Image: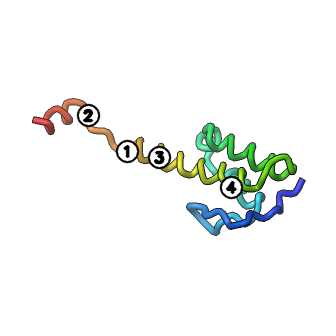
Amino acid sequence: MSWDRPFAQPVPLPKGPPAQTLRDAADYIRALPQPERDRQEWRLAVQMLIDAAEDRGPMLFARMGIVRAFETSIETTLDAGPQIPPRQAERKRS
């Protein structure tokens, strides 16, 4: 098992330097809050990292798993933005 396998291109991370290796990506995911790590997209990314580290899956899939997890996290954050209460929404339509 080699967590020091490098990505073909570094994976940009929202905070800090880009992930150069599987270990960098795993460390980033480990630092996420538990509720975030428990989300389906992050669990899938972790599985793809493990598969790549154990030579059971391509590095490209590991990279794609991380990028997809970021995209889904951003979409979820945007969707969870401030909500207008129904009564205010009705007033604004009038």
Query: Residue at the spot x=64%, y=38% of the render?
Result: 38
Q: Position of residue 60 (x, y in %)?
A: 72, 55
Element under label 2?
Answer: loop
Viewer-nearest of discs 2 and 3: 3
Residue 63 image label: 4
Amino acid type shown at disc 3: Glu
Q: Is residue 76 left or right of residue 64?
A: left
Query: Residue at the spot x=72%, y=52% of the render?
Result: 62
The residue singled out by tag 2 in the image is 85
State how far apart marks 3 and 1 are (Cα).
10 Å
**10 Å crowding of disc 2: few (<14), some (14-19), many (20+):** few
Quadrant of the image for the C terminus?
top left
Amino acid type shown at disc 1: Gly
Residue 75 image label: 3
N-terminal of the pair, mark 2 or mark 4, is 4
Q: Are marks 3 and 4 in contact (CB under 8 Å)?
A: no
Q: Residue furthest left?
A: 94
Q: Position of residue 26 (x, y in %)?
A: 73, 54
Q: Are marks 2 and 1 in contact (CB under 8 Å)?
A: no
N-terminal of the pair, mark 2 or mark 3, is 3
N-terminal of the pair, mark 3 or mark 1, is 3
Element under label 3?
Answer: helix
The residue singled out by tag 1 in the image is 81
Amino acid type shown at disc 2: Pro
Q: Are marks 3 and 1 in contact (CB under 8 Å)?
A: no
Element under label 4?
Answer: helix
Query: Residue at the spot x=78%, y=52% of the render?
Result: 58
Amino acid type shown at disc 4: Arg
**10 Å crowding of disc 3: few (<14), some (14-19), many (20+):** few
Element under label 1?
Answer: loop
